[in-house]
Amino acid sequence: MSSKTMLQTIPLILLILLVVIILIPACAPHPNTSARVDEYNNALAKSAGDSISVDNPKAASGIKAFQTFLTKISDKDYVRENTAKVYAPDAYLNDTLVTHHGPEEIMTYFHATADTMTSYEVTINDTASSGNEHYVRWTMVFSAPKLNGGKPVRSVGMSHVRLNSAGQVTMHQDFWDSGLNIYGQIPVVGGIVETIRRRLEK
């Protein structure tokens, strides 16, 4: 094959690779949203027995410890020393991307998350409680080499938590737009997400 022919085939090869990259995820099984909701409801049911309300003195200290933990997720030493203090032995965590159970799994996950980021900052905007349900609203700004070309990604979200009688988190469910702020920042995939979003806006 001549050099000229090879150069002519390169765009075709790249196009084929692009199509394959797009089609492989499209052929993967769709997320089971009912299973996700059931999982959350099961976590609520499981944590209902030992769940303290805002009028319990342990609630204030538990919420404060959780807020501090959120702001220090990128500090691996802090996470190593405090995960088992903040989260109960049977704690449930779902950040809309993955689900983990217990301090060891949660610590490992946050360590892996920290390794992917070059910067991370969380600002606690507000907290609210209704009985034994506690909500922490936050703004997060983070950077990762594989997302948004390494430039900062800014997002808002809220964490729904329950605390046991020791003030430890037994249930932690995040609510934020991970589709836009994670998948939407990945090359190629982000373009597809944005195209879908614009079509929905029309």
Image (cartoon, grey):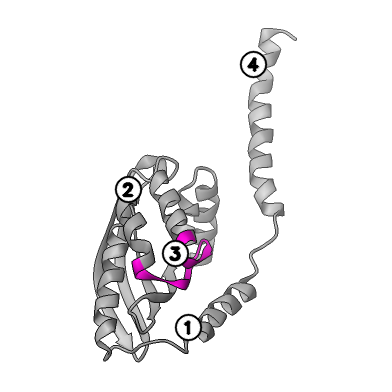
Q: Earlier in the sequence, mark 2 or mark 3?
A: 3
Among numbered discs 4 and 1, the one appearing first in the sequence: 4
Question: How far is disc 3 from disc 4 in space, using C-alphas?
Answer: 54 Å
**In the figure, 121 relative to 117: above or below?**
below
Relative to 123, is 115 on the left or the right?
right
Question: Which three-letter amino acid code belongs to the residue tagged 4?
Answer: Leu
Q: Is residue 187 above or below residue 9?
A: below
Q: Secondary structure at mark 2?
A: loop
Residue bearing the label numbered 4: 7
174 on left or right of 46: left
Structural crowding at the residue carrying mark 3, measured as other residues with C-alpha within 10 Å and reported as few (<14), some (14–19) or many (≥20): many
Q: Secondary structure at mark 4?
A: helix
Q: Which residues are magenta?
A: 85-104
* Whether residue 103 is visible: yes
Residue type pointed to by label 3: Pro
Residue at 40% across, 86% down: 51
* Mark 2 vs mark 1: in front: 1
